[in-house]
Image (tube, helix red, strand yellow):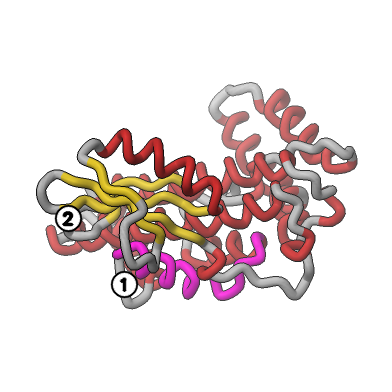
Amino acid sequence: MCVIGFTMLEDFIKSRASEVIVDIGQGPIAFAQLPVGLRELATIDAIEGIRALAQRMTREKQDAVGFVQQHSGMIASSLQPGFRLSPMGFGRDTSNLNATSVKELMRAFQIKDGWRQLNAVSSRVGIGAPSLEQSFTNAARSRHSAAHDPKANTTLGTLATIAQDALAIAVALDLILSRALAMLVSGDADYCRDDFALVHTDVRIRFLDERVGGKWASIPEGGSRAWRIATQYDQLLQASRTAAAARGENLVSRNLRLQPFAWEA
């Protein structure tokens, strides 16, 4: 369970990062105008990821040549006005992610001091933790021990902590990466400045909170009163999506204990 839990978090981070990298090309900003970190992620780092995966595919008798052609074509498209980036630049050249690789991903997206920003976002949505960076490192160690040490004894408390911290990391990283993507797709020139830093306060949140009596409340973060209250969660969700889109907000649904169980970034 420990191995599966951490692997799910790794897969989520890799998958979401891949989606965001690919979607960068939807915006009006030319590749040459992107932050240096993103350009390197989509070219130099992508080459390393392509090489590592191609070697693995060769060993497994898969079509490595076609794979290399496809993704090298994406790298080459960065020379054209309409480009589509390869997602192979993050987490593809190593077996497991570590806290440093996640931090470097955020740095490429102009998120400086990334783990501190993730801590702030997770606290805002209701999952506080002393240090998500340390939590990630501890979970990675537990996963390694559970996978390779036959005498490893992972307690139920450790499993519960890993699950809670994994949720906090997943929500926070998704929200802040999605904010970076939104700025790129909208053509925000300030985002591409060398001295720009994306911080947690750039992320806007609207909560859909469960209330006693089977009701749900849609309320912007920091609002003094609910924007709308309803008994049907799905109906309120649909209405809240429209309101959130107009205000550039992300939706986070929380239970009676104000713990997130779903979000849309």
Q: Position of residue 111 (x, y in %)?
A: 60, 67
Q: Which residue is mark 2?
A: 256
Marks counted in the figure total 2
Along the viewing direction, whichever of 30 and 101 lies nearer the viewer? 30
Q: Is residue 137 visible?
A: no
- Residue at 70%, 52% in the rendered image: 184
* Disc marking residue 255: none
Q: Main secondary structure of the magenta part?
A: helix
Amino acid type shown at disc 1: Ala
**Upstream in the sequence, badge 1 or badge 2?**
1
Quarter assignment of residue 75: top right
Q: Is residue 220 left or right of residue 74?
A: left
Q: Up-down: is 258 above or below 69?
A: below
The residue under the point 57% across, 56% down is 179
Query: SS at mark 2?
Result: loop
Residue 9 visible in the shown view: yes
State the extent of the magenta-drawn residues as a range: 109-126
Q: Local crowd at mark 1 within 10 Å, few (<14), some, or many (≥20)?
A: some
Q: Is residue 116 shown left or right of residue 123?
A: right
Residue 50 location, x and y as percent? 68, 40
Report how far apart the C-alphas of labels 1 and 2 lie in the structure: 20 Å
| SS at circle 1 | loop
Quarter of the figure with residue 85:
top right
Q: What label sits on residue 129 in the rendered view?
A: 1
